[in-house]
Image (cartoon, helix red, strand yellow):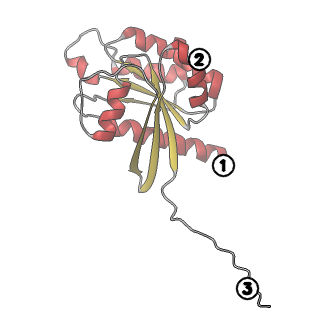
């Protein structure tokens, strides 16, 4: 009787760049979907699509290191609180958005979005993002950059960025800053 040798087979797959889960929240109509779609497709679309859970994927290099972004956009409606709670559990950084031409969306950052985030994931870094920055040139009643920076300090957020999906300005900065917030947080946990 012939015995066959015991063979252990290990399949190795090349290791890709690390995944980073970023959750994008804010009131409806502030420009979250435009931010994500324009960043991923490099094309701006004026078409508004109604609320739905969206997930986008994009590879990016920051400070010489490659990352695979998993970008979550949960539905902003209050009836979807439980779904957002689940998605917050995946977050390594949360980008809280407001539109510079929408005072209510700016106020709800501190009265609704940040309290909700603190309830479910208080140790996750928060990046404050002012969207539709191009509208400042057309509307004198916009939230100023200094007001955004002040709110960042009040909320003890990890960072503040501004962008315009329409002009394609500052989009990559949002995600570079989010990754930097994650890396800084990881470094603090190790130290």
Mark 1 Cα-neighbour bin, 10 Å: few <14, some 14–19, many ≥20: few
Q: Earlier in the sequence, mark 1 or mark 2?
A: 2
Quadrant placement of the N terminus: bottom right
SS assignment at label 1: helix
Say which residue appears at 57% left-offset and 68% top-offset: 12
Q: Residue furthest front?
A: 1
Say which residue appears at 25% left-offset and 18% top-offset: 136
Residue 26 versus residue 92 in the image, above or below: above
The answer to whether residue 173 is seen in the rendering is: yes
Say which residue appears at 40% left-offset and 27% top-offset: 129
Q: Earlier in the sequence, mark 3 or mark 2?
A: 3
| Residue on which the image places disc 3 | 4
| Residue on which the image places disc 1 | 190
SS assignment at label 3: loop
Q: Position of residue 29 (x, y in %)?
A: 36, 17
Q: CA distance from mark 1 to mark 2?
A: 27 Å
The answer to whether residue 191 is seen in the rendering is: no
105, 77: nearer the viewer: 77
Q: Is residue 154 left or right of residue 130?
A: right
Quarter residue 107 falls in: top left
Q: Position of residue 67 (x, y in %)?
A: 45, 51
| Residue on which the image places disc 2 | 115
Q: Position of residue 75 (x, y in %)?
A: 47, 21
SS assignment at label 2: helix
Residue 129 versus residue 112 in the image, above or below: below
54, 117: nearer the viewer: 54
Q: CA distance from mark 1 to mark 3?
A: 48 Å
Quarter residue 155 falls in: top right
Residue 138 versus residue 47 in the image, above or below: above
Q: Residue furthest right?
A: 1
| Residue 140 numbered tag | none
């Amino acid at each position: 009787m012939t015995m066959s040798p015991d063979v252990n087979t290990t399949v190795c797959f090349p290791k890709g760049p690390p995944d980073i889960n970023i959750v994008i929240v804010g009131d409806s109509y502030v420009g979250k979907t435009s931010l994500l779609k324009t960043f991923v497709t490099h094309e701006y679309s004026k078409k508004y699509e109604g609320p739905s859970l969206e997930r986008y994927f994009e590879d990016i290099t920051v400070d010489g290191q490659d990352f695979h972004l998993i970008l979550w956009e949960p539905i902003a409606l209050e009836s979807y609180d439980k779904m957002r709670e689940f998605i917050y559990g995946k977050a390594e950084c949360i980008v809280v958005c407001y539109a510079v031409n929408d005072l209510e969306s700016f106020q709800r950052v501190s009265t609704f979005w940040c309290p909700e985030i603190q309830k479910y994931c208080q140790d996750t870094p928060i990046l404050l993002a002012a969207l539709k920055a191009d509208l400042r040139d057309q509307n004198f009643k916009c939230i100023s950059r200094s007001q955004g920076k002040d709110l960042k300090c009040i909320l003890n957020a990890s960072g503040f960025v501004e962008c315009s999906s329409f002009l394609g300005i500052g989009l990559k900065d949002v995600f570079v800053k989010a990754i930097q917030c994650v890396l800084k947080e990881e470094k603090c946990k190790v130290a």
